Each structure stands twice: as structure tokens, then as C-alpha cells.
Image: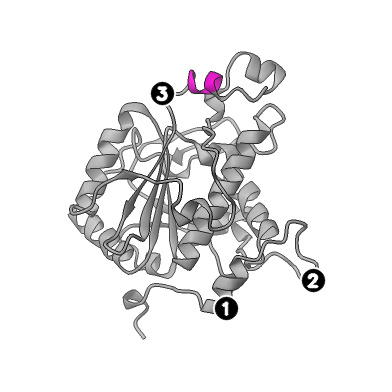
């Protein structure tokens, strides 16, 4: 069968397996480093943008690779540990392989083999899908794919709205309600604690840690957090939008003793729910 005409879907048995939590990791003794045959692979959506040099030794990074590879190194093993789903951990061990195999542009037909595409920094980085790219992403979403948009803030919402309107002209961006399945598919996400980027943690946060007062983090952000989304005509969430939220940064800095542990936990729980939702809806 033409793989371009069939979006990857897991079986009902695999869906059920994804929902069975094992908080202490696998007890089978099997090697957790699943490769090409794993149920889940984290694919980043690449697009034309300017590059930057980060503080951890990776230079000339395009903006869609923000937080790479440390976000993958931290989140994917956690996803494997917290669920019984087999997770491709090559993205957490071999960034060169990830760059070649799991970073793809909108016009790459391989996107139809991945249930979730992760899009970073779409605002100021200049994500502007053209007509052909928009049509391809529209088809991807119509077939059951899920687009996860992370890390944009303040006025950057306007170019993001414009881009999404080009992809889905007949659908609106709305706030995800508290009773949506996304909020409870694995973890119960009743608390919408804002997840900041490391750059938002200044002053005493860097000196003395975090005391649990999220309002002081919001003061460093460009507004309160919004968990937004776009639904299809059957009320399936097909685009998840983290606005004034930097989930990927929380993954990246999960091993930083100065990054607030409650926010790392929130980012892990939110990320796991996104993955499970995309795999089962």
C-alpha cells in the first residue's frame, strides 16, 4: 500500500499498552533502546529560518532545533520509563542520526509515517508555510496526524495564527478545556502551572531555587500561559499549541539543579499526555 496514502496508526492492543503506566521502569530486563521498530519516534518539523549558537556547544542551529539534543536526551527516556510504550531512543543517544532521520520538512512524505510532529519556535523564528507546505500539512492533519507547537510568546502569536490559518482556514484556535481527553489521557493535568524557559528564570531563581510561587515566573514571561488547540469536525484535537509556555526548555534543563523541579514535572506530564493522545486518537 502506498505509505503516502496511509498515516501510521497503532493497533488497539498497542493503544491499550500505551495507557498502562509503569512508574518504576521496565521490569522485564529488555534493552529500552528501541530503534526503527519502536512504537513512537519524536519527529521535529524543520522549516526555513535563521540560525543561532547556543551555550552548550552546538553552533549554527536553526531555530526549529531549539533545545536539541538535550530535550530529546531527557524527555524520551522519561517517556519510555513512565509508560510501557516502546520509544525510539536513538534521538537520545545519537543526535547525528536524529538530524538525518527524524528532522523533516513539511513537503517530506515521511511525515505521514509519524503520528506527532514537534514544532519549535514558530513565532520570531519565521515559520511561514507556503501554499504547497500548508496543503501537505493540512492533509497530514486530516488523516489523523497531530502537530505540537511549542515555545512562542507575546506578540509572536500573530504570525502563528496567520500560519495556522493558511493550513486550516476553516478551523479556529481555541483554549483547550479542562475536561478535554488530552488533560486526562494519562496524567490528570488540573494544574496549569506555567512552564518557563531558562531565560525567564532570573534573580533569586538562579541563586536560590524555586519556592513554588508561579506568579513570580509569570512576571518574567510575556503573559500568562494558554493551552490552545485546533479541533477537527469530530472534536479530535489535531493541533496542540503551547502559548507563553516553553515545554522543550523544561525538558532540556531537567538536569539543571537551578531549574524548578515542579515545572520540569509539569513539562514531562504534559509531554507524555500529548504523545499518548496523538498515539490513541
Instruction: Tell me where residue 3 appears, x and y as whole percent.
Output: 37, 78
Mark 2 highlights which residue? 28
Chain-order first, disc 3 or disc 1: 1
The mark found on residue 13 in the picture is 1
Residue appearing at x 52%, y 77% in the figure? 12
Mark before the other along the chain sequence, 1 or 2: 1
Q: Is residue 149 above or below residue 262?
A: below
Mark 1 crowdedness (10 Å alpha carbons): few <14, some 14-19, many ≥20: few
* 264 with respect to 11 (left or right): right
Mark 3 element type:
loop
SS under mark 2: loop
Calculate the distance from the C-alpha at mark 1 to the C-alpha at mark 2.
19 Å
Decide: few, some or many residues near mark 3? Use Cα within 10 Å; few <14, some 14-19, many ≥20: some
Which quarter of the figure has residue 161?
A: top left
Q: Nearer the viewer, residue 261 or 109?
A: 261
Q: Nearer the viewer, mark 1 or mark 2?
A: 1
Residue 53 in percent (x, y) is at 50, 32
Q: Which residue is mark 3?
A: 222
Report if residue 227 lies within the magenta region: no
- Residues shaded magenta: 215-219
The answer to whether residue 216 is magenta is yes
Picture residue at 68% right of the left edge, 57% below the top: 82
Q: Residue furthest front?
A: 179
Question: Taking the image as drawn, is residue 36 in sight?
Answer: no
Q: Residue furthest top?
A: 203
Left or right side of 99 for 268:
right
Amino acid at each position: 500500500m502506498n505509505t503516502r496514502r496511509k498515516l501510521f496508526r497503532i493497533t488497539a492492543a498497542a493503544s491499550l499498552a500505551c495507557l498502562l503506566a509503569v512508574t518504576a521502569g521496565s521490569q522485564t530486563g529488555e534493552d529500552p533502546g528501541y530503534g526503527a521498530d519502536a512504537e513512537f519516534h519524536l519527529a521535529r518539523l524543520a522549516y526555513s529560518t535563521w540560525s543561532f549558537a547556543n551555550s552548550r556547544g552546538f553552533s549554527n542551529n536553526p531555530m526549529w532545533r531549539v533545545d536539541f539534543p538535550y530535550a530529546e536526551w531527557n524527555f524520551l527516556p522519561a517517556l519510555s520509563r513512565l509508560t510501557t510504550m516502546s520509544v525510539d531512543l536513538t534521538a537520545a543517544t545519537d543526535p547525528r542520526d536524529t538530524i538525518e532521520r527524524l528532522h523533516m520538512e513539511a513537503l517530506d512524505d515521511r511525515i505521514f509515517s509519524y503520528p506527532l510532529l514537534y514544532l519549535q519556535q514558530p513565532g520570531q523564528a519565521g515559520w511561514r508555510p507556503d501554499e504547497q507546505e500548508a496543503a501537505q500539512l493540512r492533509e497530514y492533519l486530516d488523516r489523523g496526524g497531530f502537530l505540537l507547537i511549542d515555545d512562542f510568546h507575546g506578540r509572536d502569536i500573530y504570525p502563528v495564527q496567520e500560519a495556522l490559518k493558511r493550513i486550516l482556514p476553516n478551523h479556529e484556535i481555541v483554549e483547550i478545556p479542562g475536561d478535554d481527553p488530552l488533560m486526562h489521557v494519562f496524567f490528570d493535568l488540573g494544574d496549569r502551572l506555567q512552564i518557563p524557559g531558562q531565560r525567564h528564570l532570573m534573580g533569586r531563581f538562579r541563586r536560590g531555587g524555586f519556592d513554588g510561587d508561579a506568579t513570580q515566573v509569570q512576571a518574567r514571561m510575556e503573559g500568562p500561559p494558554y493551552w490552545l488547540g485546533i479541533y477537527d469536525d469530530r472534536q479530535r484535537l489535531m493541533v496542540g499549541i503551547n502559548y507563553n509556555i516553553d515545554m522543550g526548555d523544561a525538558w532540556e534543563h531537567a538536569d539543571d539543579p537551578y531549574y524548578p523541579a515542579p515545572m520540569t514535572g509539569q513539562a514531562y506530564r504534559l509531554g507524555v499526555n500529548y504523545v499518548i493522545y496523538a498515539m490513541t486518537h
